[in-house]
Amino acid sequence: MLDFLKDNIWVIIIVLNYALAISAASTILLKNINPTKTLSYILVLVVFPFLGLIVYYFFGQEYRKNKIFNRKNVLNEKIVQKLGKDFELSESQLHKLDDFLDEKIKLVNLLNNNKNTPVTLHNELQIIKNAKDKFDLLFEDLKHAKHHIHLEYYILKDDNIGTELINILCDKASEGIKVRLSFDDVGSKISSKTKRRMTKSGVEFYAFMPVLFPSFTGKMNYRNHRKIAIIDGKVGYVGGINVSDNYVNYKNGDSYWRDTHLRIVGEALKPLQVHFLLTWDFVSNSSCKISSELFPDVAVDSINAVQIAASGPDTDWANIMEAIFVAINTAEDYVYVTTPYFIPNDEIITSLQIAAKSGLDVRLLIPKTSDSWTAKHATNSYLERLLEAQVKVYRYTKGFIHAKTMVVDDLFSTIGTANLDYRSFNINFEINALIYNKKTSIELKNIFLEDLNDSEELTLETWQQRTKFSKLKESYCRLWSPLL
């Protein structure tokens, strides 16, 4: 028997691989997911022995359906349950909002059906262009913290800007301020020395879904891509800017990094706080005491309607993708989108094409130089279809544009962490602020138009003349696009 096993070890392994592959393929088919994605998984399982199973293990698990991210402790708290009732709008408020938004009231109703996404009215908003301005504001707010500091980041490094942040956190924790910090284990890089210092100072911190070899894991996990900062439940930040020197533009030239963030004061901080606590409950694996001090009332007179939309394997629906889809489909004048990674699903690319062919001004801004070879060429594979539909496509040439924004009709805009790609729609934990406000939307539109001054516009005729080798690279990377 041992001799037989020894002589036929590779045959046995191959047979075992395909037995598991057939089982995995059957599971994928029964999920009835997107046919393109289904075929991509099955193709990988069949063509790439062993590797296909690894890819399926990391990418093929549908965590949203499996419900392995159980975060009920926070939602069951009476204080949190009361918040939902507090944000229920009266008929007169809904009528005023309906008159202002017209067709875009569908967005409010879509997300209002999710109890964790109430629309809030009383907010002050500040759009922040680039990391230096963000950290100047954030550090000042952190230094004035009186009760708690909550931070949640995909990338946190103890380089120059990261050390400056951690110094403030340690100082505030030493003063008795409650400091809670969550960072993604793959995206972040913090030395043991820094971790010991934070522990000694009283900073509570946890890595999101720790992995054994984060440097080799790359993106082959369900990662927390959110960037959240909350100070005393009164001031909050959300957007595309992580904590790393790459974002701060210490150097000039090709290293220039363009990004967008949002500072919020007002009612929208309460749902933002809920989403932070949901993550904290998961990473700390312990019940966090929910007190009213985490949800203080903030006196804001101005009316700026905001919804905080979160999505990920822990949500029943792809909230952010659905919101973007409805926003495009209800557009009447224009749609301006900025994203560093454009690897859309069929719903989004079709809605952009239809909007452009219907006569709307549809513009897409992406980087010319990307930080991901595969994402860049996968993105390029979609551009010809857009150009044929008269979507205006621009590539940012000043550096790398990492902003994740969209503005529609001077009425609706969104700033957050979600890219227009499969990973943000289906795999990563993301969070966006959805804004229903003319002033903010026009400001974001003007920023978009300013960025076009540092961009090149593609034309269909020129784009079609790219080399066959470029098209081959695009096709290869696009084959993997549902899995990226």
Image (cartoon, grey):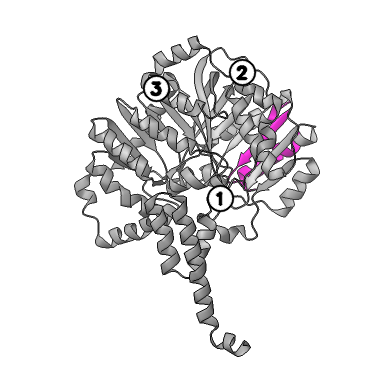
Q: Nearer the viewer, mark 1 or mark 2?
A: 2
Task: Work out which residue is located at the far top of the displayed protein and give it.
Answer: 92
Residue 166 magenta: yes
**Element at label 1:** loop
Q: Pick the residue in front: 285 or 295.
A: 285
Bin the neighbour count of mark 1 within 10 Å (Cα to Cα): few under 14, some 14-19, many 20 and up.
many
* Among numbered discs 2 and 3, the one appearing first in the sequence: 2
Mark earlier in primary sequence (1, 2):
2
Q: Is residue 381 above or below residue 455?
A: below
At 47% from the left edge and 32% from the top edge, which residue is drawn?
A: 415
Closer to the eye: label 1 or 3: 1
Amino acid at pointer 3: Leu
Residue 86: which numbered mark, if any? 2
The C terminus sits in image quarter: bottom left
Answer with left or right where residue 2 lies relative to residue 317: right
| Left or right of residue 61: residue 328 | left
Residue assigned mark 1? 222
45 or 202, which is in the foreground? 45
Identity of the residue drawn at 47% across and 59% down: 26
Question: Relative to 241, is 301 above or below?
Answer: above
Q: Are marks 2 and 3 in contact (CB under 8 Å)?
A: no
Question: Does the magenta-highlighted stretch encompass residue 160?
Answer: yes
Q: Position of residue 213 (x, y in %)?
A: 62, 61
Badge 3: few (under 14), some or many (20 or more) residues near its Cα, within 10 Å? some
Residue drawn 48% across and 35% down? 319
The kind of residue on which mark 2 rests is Asp
Q: Please state which amino acid type lies under the numbered disc 1.
A: Tyr
What residue is shown with label 3?
Answer: 411
- Where disc 3 sits, the SS reads loop
> Which range of residues does the magenta coloring cover?
143-172
